């Protein structure tokens, strides 16, 4: 078996890599570390980081989403709380926003980038 070609592998450490800030409607909405640039930002597998006290913009999932809380805390708008080790699945079409008290680091798989319905 041949070694993997350098152009066929990307490696980043979630604790030291540079994350890409994301904005929604011109407002900061967390940061993303996504290695696969063949998919749009926020689609496929990525790591999402939220600063302490941040609340995400309300959004609707286009396709199912699964996420694993690696560090920190996350609370959905309905009061459901998640912590380290919680693995969550949200069905296509689910609408919500989330808040973190202490900040969080989340591994995410999303079929498609989120949709932001008008308020």
Image (cartoon, rainbow, N blue to C red):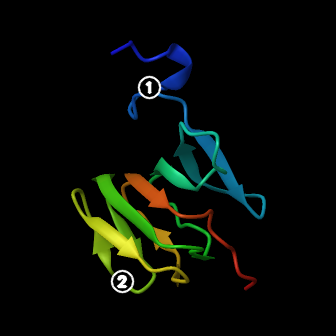
The image shows residue 28 at horizontal and vertical percentages of 66, 55
Q: Residue at x 37, y 66 (%)?
A: 74
First in sequence, mark 2 or 1: give its number: 1
Q: Secondary structure at mark 2?
A: loop
Q: Is residue 55 above or below residue 78?
A: above
CA distance separating discs 2 and 1: 36 Å
Q: Which mark is residue 79?
A: 2
Q: Residue at x 36, y 72 (%)?
A: 89
The image shows residue 34 at horizontal and vertical percentages of 54, 41
The picture quadrant where one finds residue 86 is bottom left
- Label 1: which residue? 11
Residue 72 is at least partly visible in this image: no
Q: Residue at x 38, y 32 (%)?
A: 15
The picture quadrant where one finds residue 75 is bottom left
Q: Residue at x 67, y 73 (%)?
A: 115
- Left or right side of 36 for 75: left
Q: Secondary structure at mark 1?
A: loop
Whether pointer 2 and pointer 1 mark residues with C-beta atoms closer than 8 Å, the reply is: no
- Left or right side of 118 for 103: left
């Amino acid at each position: 078996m041949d070694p993997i070609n350098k152009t066929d592998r990307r490696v980043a450490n979630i604790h030291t890599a540079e994350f890409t800030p994301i904005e929604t409607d011109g407002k900061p909405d967390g940061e993303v570390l996504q290695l696969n640039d063949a998919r749009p930002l926020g689609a496929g597998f990525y790591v999402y980081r939220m600063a302490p006290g941040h609340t995400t913009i309300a959004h609707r999932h286009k396709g199912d989403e699964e996420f694993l809380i690696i560090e920190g805390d996350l609370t959905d708008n309905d009061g459901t709380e998640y912590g380290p080790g919680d693995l969550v699945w949200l069905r296509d079409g689910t609408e919500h926003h989330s808040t973190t008290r202490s900040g969080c680091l989340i591994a995410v798989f999303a079929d498609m980038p989120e949709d932001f319905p008008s308020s």
